[in-house]
Image: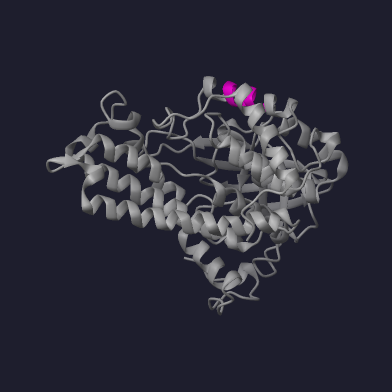
Amino acid sequence: MDFNDTPEEAAFRLEVRGFLKANAALKGTAGPANFRGEIGAAELAAAKAWQATKAAAGYAGITLPKRWGGREAPAIMQVIYAQEEEKYSVPTGVFDIGLGMCLPSVIHYADPELSDRLVPSALRGEEIWCQLFSEPAGGSDLAALRTRAERAGDEWIINGQKIWTSGAHLSDWGLLVARTDPTVSKHAGLTVFIVDMKLPGIEIRPIHQMSGASHFNEVFFTNLKIPDAYRLGEVGKGWRVSLTTLMNERLTGGFIIRRPDISDLVDLCRLLTVGDRPAIKADGVRQRIAAWYVRSQGIKLTQFRTLTALSRGKEPGPENSIGKLVNASMAQEIADYGLDLMDAGGLAMDPELAPLNMLFQEAFLATPGSRIAGGTDEILRNIIAERVLEMPADIRVDKNIPFNQIPTG
């Protein structure tokens, strides 16, 4: 691994720091005011304004062609920008799915005319994207989806349901995977489409979460008509397109800094007492902090391998599942431990009373979802075992069986 920037990377990092210093505020030690992910009109306007500012300065699509407003720079430059931006309090989450997961598939598989229409507006923050993958009956098995797409001339008629769709209620466009041929094996009969989320035939129902937010949604399709021009890739080759999206999802998710982290826990322990002394000086507390610190450093070094590969022009691989798997579970464990340290005070759902603006309370309610979104722990462990460690794959009793012959119920 190479821990140092090349001269070109160091120069770009200095440039990015100058831009951020001039246009954004550094993060404080307190938790974010809207940790649950609830996005209202004010938050949405702020996110779009920040994205437009980035785009105007050429930081919205660093690796993308200049005709779209990009820089045509290596992927490592995008990572460097993300590292520096993480230090600042800027509203970016609303665009993570579109820019980090959906657009790579659009760019790779869409016709040039369609890409020229969709990519620049997304980079400028004018349009928001969602990912229409998960379904109620499929669980973590994406290829078990039952949403149907039937061809009618130059159009496709879509009927079915998606669930846990983050930000669907805010989105202008969606990336939809549907079944176009139930007579072949489940991975072979899928096709991916770009969906205008404002079309008739789409019903979006927010899901009220225990955190109080409604960021996830159910999405229903009733005789939705999509032009064939909005199909990505070949008919029946949607699994390949989906993997492009999922690989970028793993890369994006693996590098997200999930709160609360070690620094948040240290800040909390400086405010609380255990017995008759500050929590930060209690041996048991220090042992827990040390254990999580070691785990976080392991993830940091694993990510350096990815950074080294990107710096050398290589593509991200399945090893990026490690970051998301460990970070999501660690954030939940730290949130739980923080509430334990607060004792009865952990019940205080008031940012003026709870330490760190109620960061740990809200994280306790929100972090379980992060272990499902973007790939469950079980799916990520399978990816790591089979594609990183090259262990034998799980036995699949539905392999090479036509989808419509797989027993259900």
- 223 relative to 390 in the view: left or right: right
| Magenta-colored stretch includes residue 50 | yes
Along the line of sight, the residue nearer the viewer: 35 or 73: 73
Q: Is residue 378 above or below residue 84?
A: below
Q: Is residue 172 visible?
A: no
> Relative to 2, does residue 8 appear above or below in the rendering?
above
Left or right of 267 on screen, residue 83: right
Could you say where residue 277 lies in the image, as x and y percent from the top left?
Answer: 16, 41
Q: Residue at x 53, y 45 (%)?
A: 256
Magenta stretch: dominant secondary structure? helix
Who is closer to the viewer here, 201 or 219?
219
Residue 205 vs residue 50, the one in the foreground: 50
Q: Looking at the image, how many numbered discs can be counted on the residues?
A: 0
Query: Where does the image place residue 111, in percent across and percent down from the top left?
Result: 85, 45
Is 291 in the magenta? Answer: no
Q: In this rendering, does residue 374 appear at all?
A: yes
Q: In the image, is 311 to the left or to the right of 339?
A: right
Spot occupied by residue 301 in the image (x, y as percentages of width and height): 54, 58
Q: Position of residue 390 (x, y in %)?
A: 59, 76
> Compared with residue 289, is residue 23 higher up or lower down, i.e. above or below?
above
Identity of the residue drawn at 53% across and 19% down:
42
Region rendered in magenta: 45-51
Q: Quadrant of residue 173?
A: top right
Q: Is residue 183 left or right of residue 393?
A: right
- Residue at image x 63%, y 75%? 401
The answer to whether 374 is drawn above or below residue 402 in the figure is above
Write down the quadrant of residue 288 in the picture.
bottom left
